[in-house]
Structures are given as structure tokens and as C-alpha cells.
Image: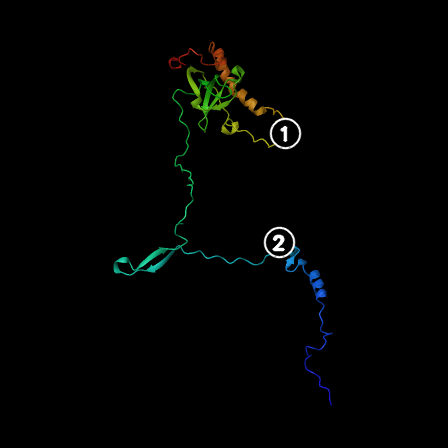
Amino acid sequence: MPQLTPKCTPSWAPRRNLEIDHAFILQALEKMARSAPIARNVGRLSRSQVAAKRGLFKGKKTATAPAKEAAPTHTEKTVGGKANGEKRLVPTAAAKASKFYPAEDVRAPKVSRKNAGKAKLRASITPGTVLILLAGRFSGRRVVFLKQLDSGLLLVTGPFKLNGVPLRRVSQAYVIATSTKVDVSAVSVPESVNDAYFAKAKAAKGSKEGEFFGEGKEKKAFPEEKKSEQKTVDAPVLAAVKKVDNLAKYLKASWGLSKSDRFHELKF
């Protein structure tokens, strides 16, 4: 009787050639995987750590984002009726105002249409007028008015040799104009003496600890150019002051109010 060779192996037959070592496959997968599993369906690394390990972000991105078409603000719809114009533009959702608004109203800054111009000079202040300073470092000092700068501030001088007031710019709101005048016709103010002349240079920022102990503070020397300009402006003013008796003493003396003074009755 001939032996029949079955086309397929019966279920009861031993499967020595088809046996699969699952432990071996798992070990191979662990070596290949970037995130080795700790337990079933649990990786050793997180999603962000795996992404960083893959390093796809290092490659050049050649894809370009498709251009977005601008959404129309209005759509055209047909309307029935002869008197309605047959067509009407209806705003879309992009053009409609939002139904929600913030609980607290945000104040918008008020737009001013005024242009800040040059302040008009008081009639009592003319070149050569002796002014009394009412505020600042030299409050109570008498100074000589030279001219009005482009910013509207007043350019004044002591002169420096008499009362220690250098070339300064002050607001006319903080001065008292006196009836005393000095002849300044011979004075020529250099063009370099303008608003930029009084601008201060920004100091470099230091540590708070160093500022507390006074570290890095060096006294800057006064520029020689400003010294020479001060002398050229003060020279003709001093010459004019010397021609008038007691005018130098008047400029040296400081002004102030006492308890019994009646300010409304004073005449300057």
C-alpha cells in the first residue's frame, strides 16, 4: 500500500521547523527600537525624547506652506422684489463683529491733533533782561537772558565768574523778569550752543551691588570745548556789567522771600 504525503501538516503533527522563539524576537526588537519597552505597551522614553533621538528636526525643510486665499468679506445674494435692487452684499462671518467683548473696557489713547510749537516769549523778556530763577539747582540766582532756543527754552548765563551760573536753558514759567537790563549787543552765541549742547550722554548700566558701594563711579572732567565757549559768551557780558555801577553786586546777590514780604506789592 503506497504512503500518501499530505499537502498540509495536520494539527496533531509536531512543528519542529516552524517553531518561533518569541524571546529572541523581542530581544532583537529591543535592540532595533529607539525606546526599549519597560513593560507591555510602555516605552522607556517619552514621545518628545524619541523625537529628539530621531533628529528629524535637523534636516532641511524643503516643503513650502500653501498660500492662503484671502476670505471674502462680503457675498452677493439675490433679493426678490423690484424695489429692492435685486442684489445685495451680505457680510460674511469674517467681516461680522464679534458677539463677545472683554469684561473690562480697554481705554484707547486719545489721538491729539495738536502740534507742539515753539512757546511764545513773554513781552517782559528781551535779550539782556536780568531774570531771577525760581527752581532748579540755582534757584534764587540772578542771570542774564541771551536768546530763546528752538525748543522754546531760554538760554541764560550768570555770568559764571560772578555768581557761578554757567550757560543753562530754563523754562520761562520758572523765572521772574526784572526791569534791569544788560547790554548784550556785542554778545555772539556760537551755533554749537543749542538744545543738543545740553544733552547728557547715557551712562552704562552697572550692577546694583556695585552702585550701592559706589564702585566704578569716576568723576568726569568737564570738556575743554564747553569751557572755552563759556568764556567767549561771558567776556562781552562781563565787560557790559562793569560799565554799570553796582550791577556786579546785584548779580552776585541771591533773591528770596521772607515771612513779612508782600509778594503782590514787590516791583522787580
Residue beneath label 1, please?
210
- Could one spot residue 83 in this view of the protein? yes
Snapshot quadrant of residue 80: bottom left
Q: Residues within 10 Å of mark 1 (few under 14, many from 20)?
A: few
- Could one spot residue 34 in this view of the protein? no
* In this view, 14 is above or below 214: below
Where residue 85 appears, as percent x and y from the top left, is: 28, 58
* In this view, 118 is above or below 102: above
Q: In which quarter of the image is the C terminus?
A: top left
Q: How far apart are marks 1 and 2 (CA)?
A: 44 Å
Q: Nearer the viewer, residue 159 or 48?
A: 48
Residue beneath label 2, please?
48
* In this view, 226 is above or below 261: below
Name the side, left or right, on which 145 lies relative to 200.
left
Q: Which mark is residue 6?
A: none
* Residue at point 28%, 58% (across, down): 84
Q: Which of 36 and 38 is in front in this view?
A: 38
* In this view, 97 is above or below 115: below
Q: Which of 186 and 230 is in front in this view?
A: 230
Where residue 47 appears, as percent x and y from the top left, is: 62, 55
Callout 1, which amino acid?
Answer: Gly
Where residue 136 appears, as percent x and y from the top left, is: 49, 21
Callout 2, which amino acid?
Answer: Ser
Name the side, left or right, on which 177 lies relative to 201.
left
Snapshot quadrant of residue 202: top right
Q: What SS does tag 2 mark?
A: helix
Q: Which of marks 1 and 2 is nearer the N terminus?
A: 2
Residue projecting furthest to the front: 12
Where residue 42 appears, as percent x and y from the top left, is: 64, 58
Instruction: Tell me how many marks there are.
Output: 2
